[in-house]
Image: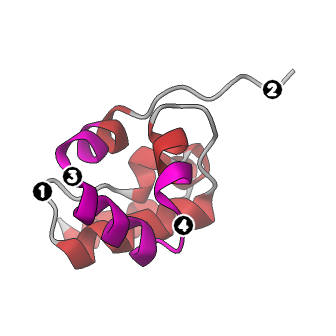
């Protein structure tokens, strides 16, 4: 049986920090909607690796601090050797 998603603390903290207009921009940059992102942040839906990448790129474009990393958002990205190597290059 698949375990239910849990709230992602980093995405939830970012979501709560953003103002409504910033949420709209963040959602647009991530090619999603504010309603869907709220569900992801609150743990009502799981985050795919594709969405994790889009959210990371959106946080970089918006220059939010701290950047929401794909490795923090997706279990698959957290286990990926290429994502780990890329993270080391950025550090």
- Tell me the number on the disc at residue 65: 1
- Distance, label 4 to label 2, CA atoms, is 24 Å
Mark 4 highlights which residue? 32
Residue at x 60% of width, y 66% of height? 50
State which tag comes first along the sequence, 3 or 2: 2
Circle 1 SS class: loop
Circle 2 SS class: loop
| Residues in magenta, as a range | 13-36
Residue at x 32% of width, y 64% of height? 87
Circle 3 SS class: loop
Mark 3 highlights which residue? 18
Of the residues tagged 4 and 1, which is closer to the observer?
4
- Tell me the number on the disc at residue 2: 2
- Who is closer to the viewer here, 50 or 35? 35
Q: How many marks?
A: 4
Q: What type of secondary structure mainly makes up the magenta span?
A: helix
């Amino acid at each position: 049986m698949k375990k239910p998603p849990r709230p992602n603390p980093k995405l939830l903290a970012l979501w709560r920090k953003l103002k409504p207009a910033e949420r709209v921009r963040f959602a647009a940059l991530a090619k999603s909607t504010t309603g869907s992102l709220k569900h992801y942040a609150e743990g009502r839906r799981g985050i795919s690796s594709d969405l994790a990448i889009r959210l990371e790129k959106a946080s970089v474009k918006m220059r939010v601090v701290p950047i929401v990393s794909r490795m923090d958002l997706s279990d698959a990205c957290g286990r990926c050797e290429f994502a780990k190597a890329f993270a080391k290059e950025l550090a």
